[in-house]
Image: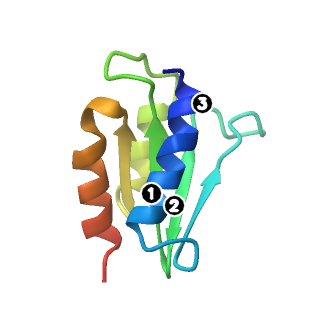
Protein backbone atom coordinates (compact mmCIF):
# COMPACT_ATOMS: atom_id res chain seq x y z
CA UNK A 1 0.00 0.00 0.00
CA UNK A 2 1.30 3.44 -0.88
CA UNK A 3 1.75 6.06 1.83
CA UNK A 4 -1.09 8.30 0.63
CA UNK A 5 -3.53 5.39 0.53
CA UNK A 6 -2.50 4.32 4.01
CA UNK A 7 -2.75 7.91 5.26
CA UNK A 8 -6.33 8.32 4.01
CA UNK A 9 -7.45 5.05 5.62
CA UNK A 10 -5.59 5.91 8.82
CA UNK A 11 -7.32 9.28 9.12
CA UNK A 12 -10.71 7.55 9.04
CA UNK A 13 -9.60 5.08 11.74
CA UNK A 14 -8.29 7.87 13.96
CA UNK A 15 -11.53 9.84 13.74
CA UNK A 16 -13.63 6.76 14.54
CA UNK A 17 -11.35 5.75 17.40
CA UNK A 18 -11.52 9.20 18.98
CA UNK A 19 -15.31 9.41 18.97
CA UNK A 20 -16.15 10.68 15.53
CA UNK A 21 -16.02 14.03 13.75
CA UNK A 22 -17.88 15.84 16.53
CA UNK A 23 -14.80 15.36 18.78
CA UNK A 24 -11.90 14.84 16.40
CA UNK A 25 -10.41 16.54 13.35
CA UNK A 26 -7.34 15.44 11.43
CA UNK A 27 -5.46 17.96 9.28
CA UNK A 28 -2.95 16.98 6.61
CA UNK A 29 0.01 19.35 6.91
CA UNK A 30 1.70 20.82 3.84
CA UNK A 31 5.48 20.27 3.96
CA UNK A 32 5.94 22.49 0.90
CA UNK A 33 5.15 25.70 2.77
CA UNK A 34 8.16 27.84 3.68
CA UNK A 35 9.88 26.70 6.88
CA UNK A 36 7.97 23.43 7.12
CA UNK A 37 10.33 20.91 5.54
CA UNK A 38 9.83 17.64 7.39
CA UNK A 39 6.79 18.80 9.39
CA UNK A 40 4.73 15.77 10.50
CA UNK A 41 2.05 14.64 8.07
CA UNK A 42 -0.94 14.86 10.39
CA UNK A 43 -2.16 17.09 13.18
CA UNK A 44 -4.84 15.37 15.23
CA UNK A 45 -7.19 17.68 17.14
CA UNK A 46 -9.26 16.07 19.88
CA UNK A 47 -11.48 18.35 21.98
CA UNK A 48 -8.96 20.83 23.42
CA UNK A 49 -5.86 18.70 22.77
CA UNK A 50 -3.69 17.93 19.77
CA UNK A 51 -0.98 15.55 18.53
CA UNK A 52 1.37 15.14 15.58
CA UNK A 53 1.88 11.97 13.54
CA UNK A 54 4.42 11.24 10.81
CA UNK A 55 2.94 8.60 8.50
CA UNK A 56 5.12 6.01 6.78
CA UNK A 57 4.09 3.27 4.36
CA UNK A 58 6.08 0.70 6.34
CA UNK A 59 8.49 0.30 9.20
CA UNK A 60 11.33 0.20 6.66
CA UNK A 61 10.43 3.54 5.03
CA UNK A 62 13.18 6.12 5.19
CA UNK A 63 12.79 9.37 7.08
CA UNK A 64 13.32 12.70 5.38
CA UNK A 65 15.37 15.63 6.64
CA UNK A 66 13.92 17.28 9.75
CA UNK A 67 11.16 14.70 10.40
CA UNK A 68 12.77 13.38 13.57
CA UNK A 69 13.65 16.94 14.62
CA UNK A 70 10.00 18.08 14.38
CA UNK A 71 8.74 15.09 16.37
CA UNK A 72 11.37 15.57 19.05
CA UNK A 73 10.73 19.32 19.27
CA UNK A 74 6.97 18.97 19.73
CA UNK A 75 7.12 15.87 21.94
CA UNK A 76 7.95 18.19 24.83
CA UNK A 77 4.40 19.57 24.78
CA UNK A 78 2.20 17.02 22.99
CA UNK A 79 2.04 13.44 21.76
CA UNK A 80 4.17 12.76 18.66
CA UNK A 81 5.05 9.57 16.82
CA UNK A 82 5.95 7.90 13.59
CA UNK A 83 3.08 5.62 12.57
CA UNK A 84 3.04 2.81 10.00
CA UNK A 85 0.99 -0.38 9.59
CA UNK A 86 3.35 -2.47 11.73
CA UNK A 87 2.98 -0.21 14.82
CA UNK A 88 -0.44 1.31 14.16
CA UNK A 89 -2.33 -0.33 17.02
CA UNK A 90 0.38 0.49 19.53
CA UNK A 91 0.56 4.13 18.42
CA UNK A 92 -3.22 4.58 18.30
CA UNK A 93 -3.49 3.11 21.81
CA UNK A 94 -0.85 5.58 23.02
CA UNK A 95 -2.51 8.45 21.14
CA UNK A 96 -5.85 7.65 22.72
CA UNK A 97 -4.29 7.54 26.20
CA UNK A 98 -2.41 10.79 25.61
CA UNK A 99 -5.46 12.67 24.33
CA UNK A 100 -8.04 10.90 26.47
CA UNK A 101 -10.14 12.43 29.19
Instruction: Name the residue that disc number 2 marks.
Output: 44
Q: In the visual, does 72 lie left or right of 47?
A: left
Which residue position is annotated with label 3?
4
In the image, is residue 21 above or below residue 9?
below
Q: Nearer the viewer, residue 91 or 19?
A: 19
Report, in whole angstroms, how far the alpha carbon at label 1 lies from the one at label 2: 8 Å
What is the quadrant of the C terminus in the image?
A: bottom left
SS at circle 3: helix
Tell me which residue sits at (31%, 42%) in the image.
Answer: 88
Does 85 sit above or below residue 46? above
Asked if the residues shown at circle 3 and circle 1 are in contact, with their CB atoms under 8 angstroms apart, the answer is: no
Position of residue 1 measured from the top left corner of the image (x, y, whole percent): 48, 21
Where residue 90 sits in the image (x, y, percent)? 22, 47
Determine contact: label 1, label 2, CB under 8 Å: yes
**31 relative to 12 in the view: left or right:** right
Can you tell which of label 2 and label 3 is closer to the viewer?
3
The residue at the point 77 percent across, 39 percent down is: 34
For disc 3, the neighbor class at 10 Å (few under 14, some 14 to 19, many from 20) is: few
Q: Residue at x 50, y 81 (%)?
A: 48
Residue at the disc numbered 1: 14
Amino acid sequence: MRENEYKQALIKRIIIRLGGPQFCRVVINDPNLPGQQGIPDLTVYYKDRWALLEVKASEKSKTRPNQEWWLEKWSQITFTSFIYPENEEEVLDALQRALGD
